Amino acid sequence: MKKIIPVVVVLVVVLTSCRGLKDDTFQPDFQNTELLPRLTCWIDQPSFENAYGANSYSVKASDDLTHPYGLTETPYGKGVYEVNENTKLYTAEKRIQDAKNIFVYDVNENITDPTTERAGNIVLRAGAIYCKNNYKWSWLSGFTLGIFNAFGMPMATNITELEVIVEIYDKRDNLVAQFNERGYAKVPMAAYHGYTEFQRRAGDLALQDGLMKIKELISRDYQMINAKLK
């Protein structure tokens, strides 16, 4: 018993040193070679709540808490709100706020030129999702008191596949382009090299993967999109 106690203490120390999410999680670094004119970002919050099975208390996405309008009807559907880098989405699900942060950053830094005149709106929606935690190594982790985990064996993994939908509209709310891609990510819950919020990180990376594919399609159709936005 005395020999087991030091091992358990080491395990606890190692597991509590797991990494959290860093800022660069929300800052995709792939930029299109040709940038569209400035577009206002909108997010379909109910679609993400449905995808993530979120328990939320949604109100109008606004920093002004004195005007909670609930899930109001907007030009792009009920609960689809205009967002910017300062917008707080009132939901208990962190992955939804993450989605807003990733999307706004990607649009402003990698898809459009924010210094140009506004030409329309860009909307992000979530479609179908596959999200599963795999605990196949957990029995071995318990049997070995986590010793193998300290040397790189995952305790669990999360696989997330997310349908990412992006729509671009001109200033008259005419649909200019629509893209639909599936993003994929697999993230381990491990010791010091893993992530405490591994399911959250998998969701964020799956969204980035989907947006990466959509950026390639936007680049392909740049001439057509740019012409319709004028």
Image (cartoon, helix red, strand yellow):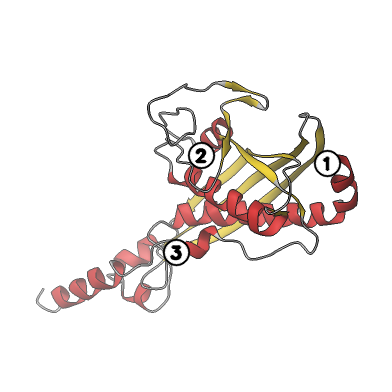
The residue labelled by disc 1 is 229
- Side of 168 where 28 appears, left or right: left
Quadrant assignment, res 149: bottom left
Q: Position of residue 228 (x, y in %)?
A: 87, 40
The three-letter amino acid code for the residue at tag 3 is Lys
- Seen in the picture, residue 201 relative to 179 is either above or below; the reply is below
- Side of 220 where 19 appears, left or right: left
Q: What crowding class fits label 3: few (fewer than 14 Cα within 10 Å), some (14-19), or many (20 or more)?
A: few
Q: Pick whichever of labels 1 and 2 is earlier in the sequence.
A: 2
The residue labelled by disc 2 is 52
In which quadrant of the rendered image does the N terminus lie?
A: bottom left
- Side of 55 where 47 appears, left or right: right
- Side of 127 where 195 appears, left or right: left
Quadrant assignment, res 72: top right
The three-letter amino acid code for the residue at tag 1 is Leu
Front in this rendered view, residue 184 or 125: 125
Residue 22 is marked as 3
Front in this rendered view, residue 189 or 54: 54
Residue 12 is marked as none
Identify the residue at horizontal 14%, vertical 73% (top origin): 5
Q: Can you tell which of label 2 and label 3 is closer to the viewer?
A: 3
- What distance separates the C-alpha of mark 2 from that of mark 3? 21 Å
- What distance separates the C-alpha of mark 3 from that of mark 1? 35 Å
Q: Pick whichever of labels 2 and 3 is earlier in the sequence.
A: 3
